[in-house]
């Protein structure tokens, strides 16, 4: 389904007076408000195709109604999100969960909704139907050369699908590792993995990037073959200039200083992509900003500072994607919340007076440095986000429109109350 533009316009008309007052108040205290609004309009988040349905845990999954049943319906759902917030203009596919059977038709449908194709994601962390060899003991790290080649071949297949859709990057995440001491030789596992990544890297189109994602634990609990940002960076440096580290906010041990990791990867020009979610304990895949919004702001402060230092475009310099699991909430509402939280943190980071912060740092004025950051963080930037949506033709309040016009109810009417998204 598609949402009629007049519905958004009518809802905006009802809210316009109140919005203008709030925006005028914020804009009067921020000299760069117009510039920030324009940057917010440009900043787009990729929505992963697997996030449009209810997720789950190893204990169970409780699907909701009206979930997309195929890739076409997933693109339509992202089109709904994009119509509501004009900030969800990209989709990231996971192969083989979402194989485009007719790439030209899929590209045309996405273009109709104003959506382009972001990074392609390979899957060697689970066995697929009719798969010849198993990844139970790893993929690119496997002791069996035939298993490793199978994993390489799959990634090459993903690249071919990406080329047909106009994507420009490949994300490789490996669940490879070990659960018990002595289970594998760390050096050989690294060397096998590097050898496989080199074969994949050699097949990248000239204008593509490879993102290497890391994870501290799970599904293996003793070691992960790409277990932290240092290991990912080591692979990327050995592969070449088209290989980068990808940071997923949930893929760290509790208490990790993610903002420092971001700063150093930007310094090395090896930060390629970012997956947003939130967590309390580990890879919880919760709604962005729901647990620790201050950390999200601090991360964005380093992102903005680092991108500006390298004179890199904020919107296109990195791959931006949400990667979350919606277990008890409506997936579309959850994604609207996440995009809002990301852009709030981004807007707050844009408020930081970087020159004053540098001066405070150079004078060892710890108190002032903290005040500069917290002053920006405590600023209510939501009117700036609303203004950016208004100028882009989106809804002033996307979630209110979603609920007021019973979009989930209409999706259930079209798709059924027991529809289950594919690939989950």
Image (cartoon, helix red, strand yellow):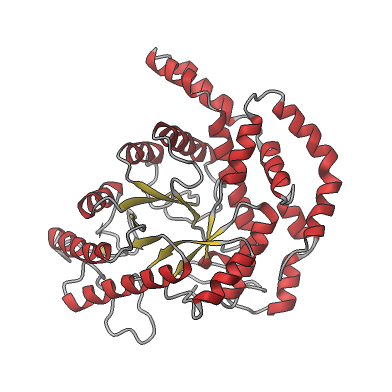
Which percent across, then down, holds residue 207?
A: 36, 57
Residue drawn where x is 39% and y is 52% of the image: 251
Q: Is residue 32 visible?
A: yes
Instruction: Give the left or right position of residue 268, taking residue 250 as reference.
Output: left
In the visual, does 162 lie left or right of 399?
left
Residue at image point 28% right, 79% down: 134
Q: Tell me residue 234's x, y (percent).
A: 22, 49
Camera-side residue of 146 and 40: 40
User: Quarter-wise, where is residue 343 in the image?
Assistant: top right
- The image quadrant of residue 58 is bottom left
Q: In front: 394, or 150?
A: 394
Q: Position of residue 219 (x, y in %)?
A: 34, 64
Identify the image quadrant of residue 109.
bottom right
Nearer to the camera, 409 or 47:
47
For the point 55% across and 73% down, the residue is 106
> Would residue 113 appear left or right of 17 to someone viewing this image?
left
Which residue is at a point 46% across and 38% down the rendered structure image?
299
């Amino acid at each position: 389904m598609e949402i009629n533009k007049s519905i958004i316009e009518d809802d905006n008309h009802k809210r316009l007076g109140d919005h203008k007052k709030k925006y005028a108040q914020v804009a009067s205290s921020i000299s760069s408000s117009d510039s920030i609004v324009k940057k917010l309009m440009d900043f787009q988040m990729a929505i992963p195709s697997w996030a449009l349905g209810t997720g789950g845990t190893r204990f169970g999954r409780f699907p909701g109604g009206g979930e997309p049943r195929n890739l076409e319906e997933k693109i339509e759902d992202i089109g709904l999100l994009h119509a509501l917030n004009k900030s969800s203009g990209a989709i990231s596919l996971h192969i083989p969960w979402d194989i485009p059977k007719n790439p030209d038709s899929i590209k045309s449908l996405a273009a109709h909704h104003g959506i382009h194709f972001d990074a392609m994601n390979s899957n060697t962390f689970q066995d697929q139907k009719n798969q010849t060899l198993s990844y139970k003991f790893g993929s690119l790290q496997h002791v069996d050369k035939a298993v490793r080649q199978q994993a390489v071949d799959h990634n090459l297949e993903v690249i071919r699908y990406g080329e047909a859709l106009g994507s420009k990057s490949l994300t490789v995440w490996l669940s490879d590792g070990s659960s018990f001491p002595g289970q594998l030789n760390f050096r050989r596992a690294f060397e096998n993995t590097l050898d496989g990544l080199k074969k994949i890297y050699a097949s990248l189109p000239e204008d593509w990037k490879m993102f290497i994602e890391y994870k501290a634990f799970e599904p293996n609990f003793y070691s992960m073959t790409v277990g932290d940002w240092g290991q990912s960076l080591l692979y990327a440096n050995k592969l070449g200039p088209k290989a980068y580290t990808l940071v997923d906010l949930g893929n760290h041990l509790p208490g990790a200083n993610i903002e420092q990791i971001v700063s150093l990867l930007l310094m090395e020009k090896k930060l390629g992509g970012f997956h947003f979610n939130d967590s309390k304990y580990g890879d919880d895949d919760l709604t962005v900003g729901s647990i620790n919004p201050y950390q999200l702001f601090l991360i964005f402060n380093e992102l903005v500072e680092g991108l500006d230092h390298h004179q890199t475009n904020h919107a296109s310099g990195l791959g931006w994607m949400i990667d979350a699991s919606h277990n008890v909430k409506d997936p579309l509402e959850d994604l609207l919340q996440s995009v809002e939280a990301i852009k709030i943190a981004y807007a707050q980071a844009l408020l930081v007076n970087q020159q004053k912060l540098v001066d405070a740092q150079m004078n060892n004025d710890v108190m002032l440095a903290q005040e500069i950051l917290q002053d920006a963080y405590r600023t209510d930037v939501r009117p700036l986000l609303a203004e950016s949506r208004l100028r882009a033709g989106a809804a002033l309040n996307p979630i209110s429109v979603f609920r007021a016009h019973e979009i989930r109810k209409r999706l259930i009417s079209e798709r059924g109350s027991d529809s289950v998204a594919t690939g989950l």
